[in-house]
Amino acid sequence: MDEPSMPIPSEGSTPPSPLSPPGPPTPPIPLAELLASRDLGLRRIAGPAEAELLWVHTSEMADPYPYLLGGELLLSAGVLLTDPDTYVGRLVEAGAAALGFGVRPVHETVPGALIEACDRQGLPLLEVPPETPFTAIARTVWRLMAEARHRELRRVTRAQQALATAAARPDPVPAVLHQLAAQLGGRAVLLTARGEEVHAAGRDPAEEVHAAGRPLAPEAAGALTRLARVVARERPGSPASATDAHGDTHLSAYALGGAEGLVLALATRGRESGDHTVAGIAVVLLSLLAAPHQGADAEGRSAALVRMLLGADPAEVAPLLGATGPWTVIHARRTDGTPADALTAGALGASLGTALVDAGRGGGEAVRLLLPGAVPEDEAARLLTGAEAERPLREAEGEPARRQPGMAPQDEAVRPLPEADRVTPQPGWTLGASAPTPVTALDAADALAARALARARATRAPLAVDTPVRGLAALVPPEQAAAHARALLAPLTAPLADTLRCWLSLHGNWDRTAVALGVHRNTVRQRIGRCGELLDADLDDMDVRAELWFALRQG
């Protein structure tokens, strides 16, 4: 009954320091679970009912303090027990979790002085019956630890899968926070270095209630913010994580790698086994989602901004952004109509392969993105076909091939484009894209992307692309086409021209045009009627529509 139940240091060797114990290899076991094992016949006869067991150790030394790491269930038959009060005091000082005292052959019963000492100093005391060897207790503890470890691994695996699924949603940052709060049963908050809330999910700790019905102290939220400032990477040497407790609430904060001062803060009712691992998975995902895309580094973007503010030509600063062109402008809105914050817009930019994202205009405006060298998926095929179709005709006439606005040069157009350089629909988003455009014409491309987005929303398509001029229209010299368009559309005001362009692009559908323009369908009818009067043309005539469409495509 006095043989060791697990590897322990030799009691004649130099004792390890109890001040820096290694971490437990498995989750702790509640004392109640061990007592529930009826085959052992253990009985708690003194001390508190709650304790967590990290190890099992057997010792018959008068003072085992130097050989304890803390959290042990110490098993002893009391061979050298002479002063129970001092003995228990040393165990409590070493951090032992509980004492198991075996009766017979040394003691017929547990000494009363030992029972009183354990009650007085708050150490759980278990009576071990004669028929129960200490090794059987050790085996039971390790079995319970293995089962707990298995439960922890299954929980972490499920949480990892749920968090990864959330990270693939159109709104990945809020989705990950919501899933993390659900997994931990608390509140997850993304904070800036100054403590400002960016996103939050889960129940507010200030609104939660204890099982006894007492409300949680409202200062917990402030304590969580202060803890987050500790790990915010605003100064060298800041820790990567920190924990604290506020009443019954466990607080923790984690700095996000690659993000400027962002902190993940958590408030939970307790700390269960595996919580730290689950939080670590979320930290990695949020760091990737919140970090700026690496296609154009921050130094290059900063230099480009400074030069533009100082009057540099766009063509001069474009190489600093990672490419020389052509460029594609994209306007995007959430499909469900909810506004997009900076992190969600940044995640969209990362999916499309760009860090050039404008999501800060507010007022319900669309997110704008700038993609260097990007070509819409269907546009790539049309560019290839169009370039090869026009080349024989122009070469036969002895005329060098002329590049139309928004079209790639021939030596580039006939080259297959990699899949990564194509604009594709994104789940949860409605996109409108311009045709590939030189950097000097991005203002016009911005307007074209806005029109494409309006058309996509009206037709409920995930992606609409404003295609460049091609086919027969491309045979007309741009200068002559522009002059003809100005003369033909001169009677129309800008709002009327925009309405006519949208109406024609949607094949004369009143309802879809109203949706795209955000006006009533009767307003569309009135404007189109006015266009017909000013142009003195029958807008139901297909030839008239074709000529007007050609003219409208020039502006």
Image: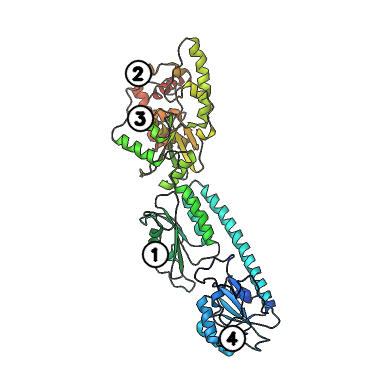
> Circle 1: is it few (<14), some (14-19), or many (20+) Cα within 10 Å?
some
* 206 or 400: nearer the viewer: 400
Regarding mark 2 in the picture, which secondary structure is present there? Answer: helix
Q: Looking at the image, which residue is at 54% across and 83% down?
A: 87
In the rendering, which numbered label is found on residue 316? 3
Secondary structure under badge 1? helix
Q: Quadrant of the N terminus?
A: bottom right
Cβ–Cβ below 8 Å for labels 3 and 2?
A: no
- Depth check, mark 3 against mark 4: the one in front is 4
Q: Which tag is nearer the camera, tag 4 or tag 1?
A: 4
The answer to whether residue 157 shows anywhere in this view is yes
Q: Is residue 435 above or below residue 291?
A: above
Q: What is the spatial separation of the Cα atoms under label 4 and label 1, in whole angstroms?
A: 47 Å
> Alpha carbon of mark 4 to alpha carbon of mark 2: how far?
108 Å
Quarter holding the C terminus is: top left
Give me the C-alpha separation between circle 3 and circle 4: 87 Å
Q: Residues within 10 Å of mark 2 (few under 14, many from 20)?
A: few
Q: Going from the N terminus, do you reach mark 3 or mark 2 first?
A: 3
Closer to us: mark 3 or mark 2? 3
Q: Nearer the viewer, residue 34 or 537?
A: 34
Amino acid marked by disc 2? Ala
Mark 4 or mark 2: which is in front? 4
- Alpha carbon separation for disc pair 3 and 2: 30 Å
Q: CA distance from mark 2 to mark 1?
A: 68 Å
Identify the mark nearer the N-term, 2 or 1. 1
In the image, residue 199 sits, relative to residue 100, either above or below, namely above
- Viewer-nearest residue: 319 or 457: 319
Residue 81, numbered circle: 4
